[in-house]
Amino acid sequence: MPQSLSKVYLHITFSTKHRANLIDKSVENKLFEYLGGICRNLECNPIQIGGFQNHIHILCTLSRKIAIMKLVEEIKKSSSKWIKTVDEKYKDFYWQDGYGVFSVNPAEIDVVIAYIQNQEVHHTKRSFQDEYRLFLKKYNVEYDEKYVWD
């Protein structure tokens, strides 16, 4: 086959260090836009970006030119450096070390978009930790609870 083709949809999620509520209304839209710019620069088309207070969700495609680990590393590194320049109150902003990445069926893109768009409402009923556990269960990811949060 002379041409390499792919269309891989990723749902990426990660939280602030110690799940600190540092993503406030004054910065969230700028942060989401900045995260989208990082994805675009890495040729990973951002489809929907959102989050709430202490975590982020990114729905994007995966470029053939980058590994998932490198994509997430660049997103977190660049956005962490950027947010510290926005305001003095973000000088101690850090992302957690880990992350979750889940494949998305193209038929479920609209469901994931709606889910990401409704994070504030969604989190009146469920914490990020409970939400993340459900993702791990849905995708049959084996994990040790003591290593997921610290």
Image (cartoon, rainbow, N blue to C red):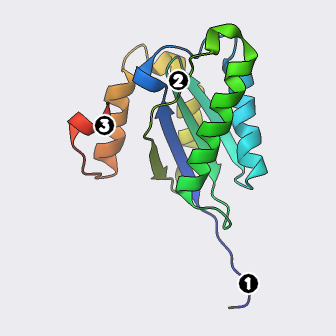
Q: Nearer the viewer, mark 1 or mark 2?
A: 1
Amino acid under disc 3: Val
Residue 96, how many percent across, how many down? Answer: 45, 32
Q: Which mark is residue 3?
A: 1
Q: Residue at x 36, y 35 (%)?
A: 132
Instruction: Tell me the residue that label 3 is attached to.
Output: 148
Label 3 vs label 1: CA separation? 39 Å
Quarter of the image where the C terminus is located: top left
Q: Quadrant of residue 117?
A: top right
Residue 147, how many percent across, how many down? Answer: 27, 38
Amino acid under disc 1: Gln
For the residues labelled 3 and 2, say whether their Cβ atoms are less than 8 Å apart: no
Q: Which mark is residue 80?
A: none
Pointer 1 local density, CA inside 10 Å: few below 14, some 14–19, many at least 20: few
Instruction: Tell me the residue that label 2 is attached to.
Output: 119
105 vs 100: above or below: below
Q: Nearer the viewer, residue 142 or 89?
A: 89
Q: Secondary structure at mark 1?
A: loop
